[in-house]
Amino acid sequence: MELKVLKRSTFPIRSEEDIVKARQIVRNWANEVGFKLVDQTKLVTATSELARNTFVHGGGGEMMLEQVEDGTRSGLRITFQDHGPGIPDVTRALQDGYSTAGGLGLGLGGAKRLVHEFSIQSEVGKGTVVIIVKWV
Amino acid sequence: MEKAKTLYALLSGHQNEILRQWQKEQLAPGVLRSDLISPDELKQQMEDFLRYLVEAVKKDETEDMSSLEAWKEVRSFLTEISKTQAKKGFLPSETSMFIFSLKKPIFQLLQSYDTEDLEKFASDLWKVNTLLDQLGLLTMESYLKSKEEIIRRQQEEMLELSTPVVKIWEQVVAVPLIGTLDSARTQMVMENLLQEIVRVSATIAIIDITGVPTVDTLVAQHLFKTVSAARLMGAECVISGIRPQIAQTMVHLGVSFQDITTKATLAEAIKYAFSRVGYRISKGESTK
């Protein structure tokens, strides 16, 4: 089914405050699109994890927020992009408990489990793009 | 037509005239913020400022008027005015207009120059223009600095306000967390909590997260660290206020609170804490 984009906006992720802002914006959009409270919380939490990765590991970047529709369902697609060092071993980064920054090592894998669609593309030296979709 | 020798001669010779024109600009209806400053106070400020300005021009009439020594008084006086205006609630444009409205009276005066001497006219015009622009920027800088100070102070106040550790009963303390748990705040919570544990000899500390909108892995990690630190000091931690949506999210995220006692509500946590230290809550006669 062809994906239709109804609304699109881009936000910078360059500081701790931007992560807070990103969470608030995603919560507002999720509310407008009609997500239930549990799903709103899941999406906002995934956003928080990925935005923090963009800031901490990617050295900052941006978040693109899209309201999408595939004919029967509507949802939100969020793209996190940075031009940081990239991830050498994506499979390993997705493993629970693996962290390079002294965290819990659950952020990336956890974010994947909180949404319906998850894709990650990373190239060492070029940067990382993570795209998530959650349907209402 | 008179022939002005120097900028200083021109300004000091017409100081009163400039002041009158300038005050007319600033005291005009719609410009004067009579709700924030009295006309007399403003007039006095303008008179003082102009006096400092003329004095500085006398000391330093070089090309770019950049001698720090000569302009020290003007700059500090202007900084003070701008800071006061920021605190009183003037708009940034109003604060910078204090300087920019001085352009008109001085430019008018420059027009009375000998028309033969265009070079002198142009160079003095440029000098005055640059000078007033720089001073205008200085007002903005001071204004913003003052506003930033206010914001920083409020932030610090909020940091302290939002992390009160309360004693519930003998040996039991609680800290209700509200809002975003960024690193600075979590640090403060941890310190406050550990200090209170020592101060009241607490054996149980309740951390209530009802007011935390998002619990992600970083927040969870901060909580774990706080719990570990409290344990090292001999206190047990109970995390309460885990709402259904947070619980479901945590499960998917893979964060496990395995060896930490958690309760859905603060009431449950208090009940648990009391039983741990040997108190029992029982219903008695109503005093109503």
Image (spheres, coloured by chain):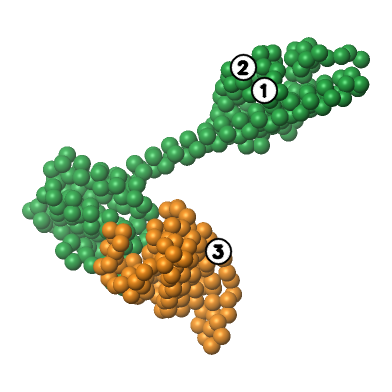
Instruction: Mark 1 and mark 2 in contact? Answer it, CB < 8 Å.
Output: yes
On the same chain, marks 1 and 2? The answer is yes
Percent position of residue A99, x then y:
29, 64
Query: Which residue is label 2 attached to?
Result: B70
Q: Secondary structure at mark 2?
A: helix
Q: Is residue A123 above or below residue A13?
A: below
Percent position of residue B7, x then y:
76, 17
| Label 2: how many Cα within 10 Å (few below 14, some 14–19, many 20+) | some
> Is residue B101 visible to the viewer in this orientation of the structure?
no
Q: Chain under label 3?
A: A
Label the orange chain with its letter. Answer: A
Q: Chain under label 1?
A: B
Label the green chain with its letter. Answer: B
| Label 1: how many Cα within 10 Å (few below 14, some 14–19, many 20+) | some
Q: Residue at x 52, y 33 (%)?
A: B146
Q: Which mark is on residue B65?
A: 1
Which of the marked residues, 1 or 2, is nearer the chain's N terminus?
1
Q: Secondary structure at mark 3?
A: strand
Q: Of the residues shown, which amino acid type is indicated by label 3?
A: Thr
Q: Residue at x 37, y 61 (%)?
A: B214
Query: Which residue is label 3 attached to?
Result: A10
On the same chain, marks 2 and 3? The answer is no
Q: Is residue A97 above or below residue B278?
A: below
Q: Nearer the viewer, residue B96 or B89?
A: B96
Q: Nearer the viewer, residue B242 or B155?
A: B155
Real-space CA distance between mark 2 and mark 3, rounded to the nearest whole angstrom: 49 Å
Percent position of residue A8, x then y:
57, 69
Which of the 4 image quarters holds residue A36?
bottom left
Q: Secondary structure at mark 1?
A: loop
Q: Is residue A103 left or right of residue A46?
A: left
Q: Of the residues shown, which amino acid type is indicated by label 1?
A: Met
Q: Is residue B144 left or right of residue B285?
A: right
